[in-house]
Amino acid sequence: MIERLAIVVLAIAALTGAARPEDDFQPTPEEQRRLELMSRPEAWFLKALSGPREVIDGQRLDPKLQYYFEERRRRTPEQVERGLNTFLDPQARVVTRERLTREWALFTKVTAPMRKVEDRKIDGRGGSIPIRIYTPKVEGEDPLPLLVYFHGGGWLYSGIEATDRFARLMANEAQAIVISVEYRLAPEHLWPASNDDGEDAFLWARANARQLGSEPDMVAVGGDSAGGHISLNISLRQIVAKRPTPAYQLLYYTSSDFAEGDESYRLFEKGYGLDDTFRAFMIATVFPGDLLQKATQELNAASFTGMPATIAVSAGFDMLRDSSRRLSERLLKAGVPATYLNYPTLAHGFLQWSAVVPDAERASIDTARLFGTAVRSRVAVLRQQARTRQGE
């Protein structure tokens, strides 16, 4: 009970205190022990594995992640069910969310300090929306790309504090401003509250881009898992409303269709973090009644023509792997520039492992740098096309 209280107090202090340019996450003693364990060399984990190295579909799972999953698989179905049901109890939900927030932060890489970090609350149709704005240290005064970023967590948990370290990494490696958005979560707020908050944050970012050090046509969207789904909806909503779309989309392990027929779903539906048990609970909690049908139809029935250029990133040991690939193929068929990257040794949620898993670190850094280069190139191309049309 004391440890739980300490976690909640630390988390509340982080949320209410002023954002700082330098990372100020402080592990508890127990968290420090876990960090030191997962920071051990790969050779230690190779000896500590319960079974042989896992090779599935021609892919070999990272040994640290295999060790972690072997530990998780020891939980009984009753323990898993109790853990999920904490999201249905208001008091237990707070403790669970803060525990997961700290776990995400704990294993994410620490990067260089920002030039500026600012917490704000902006107006949204559902109330105020907390955001955190990360401005990296760069040379010169040229406008920077701006990425409006939406965290994962199955629409049930995570937020600004959970993804603070990744947002800093993204800002540094992409040389871009990052706005992290604390959208409303279920079960308090059912879908599409998250999409409404996401769109409101994107529109605010475009309206305030110049004051933040960017330009309206340099504002992109991105996210991991549920956050990628929010990003897709933002872009589609702008097309329907005949407003400017985001400059780019950066989508990590994102599904657009909730499909269950993929080969990756069959291969990785149990034992690799995101699984069919969590998925079933999430759908029942976030999309009760006919909301799942509406959410699926919204994306499946839409034309992807006119969508922003996209980087779609997947993990090899992820039930959503094939869905991410199929998403990029659908974009390409619609004439949208799309790049698909799969990291075969990793699993769903790898952005939160960059401090201890070398392949996760490389994937995080490489995709951030690629995004920074790609969005600048895309903006230049679109501006040149606009000038050409004006000269006709």
Image (cartoon, rainbow, N blue to C red):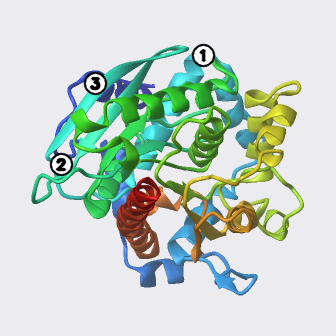
> Distance of mark 3 from mark 1, alpha carbons?
20 Å
**Mark 3, secondary structure of its residue:** helix
- Nearer to us of marks 1 and 2 is 2
**Mark 2, secondary structure of its residue:** loop
Q: Is residue 26 visible?
A: no
Type of the residue with mark 1: Pro
Q: Who comes first in sequence, dot 1 or dot 2?
A: 1
Q: Residue at x 63, y 31 (%)?
A: 241
Mark 3 nearby-residue class (10 Å; few <14, some 14–19, many ≥20): few
Count of residue discs? 3
Q: Residue at x 44, y 67 (%)?
A: 367
Circle 1 residue: 90
Circle 2 residue: 114
Q: Is residue 331 left or right of residue 205?
A: right
Q: Residue at x 54, y 31 (%)?
A: 199
Question: Which quadrant of the view contains residue 187?
Answer: top right
Mark 2 nearby-residue class (10 Å; few <14, some 14–19, many ≥20): many
Using the image, determine if residue 286 lies above or below residue 345: above
Using the image, determine if residue 376 lies above or below residue 226: below
Circle 3 residue: 13
Given the current orientation, which residue lies at the most extreme front position? 392
Front-most of 264 and 88? 264
Type of the residue with mark 3: Ala
Q: Who comes first in sequence, dot 3 or dot 1?
A: 3
Q: Is residue 215 left or right of residue 147?
A: left
* Image coords of residue 191 (percent x, y): 70, 27
**Mark 1, secondary structure of its residue:** helix
Disc marking residue 125: none
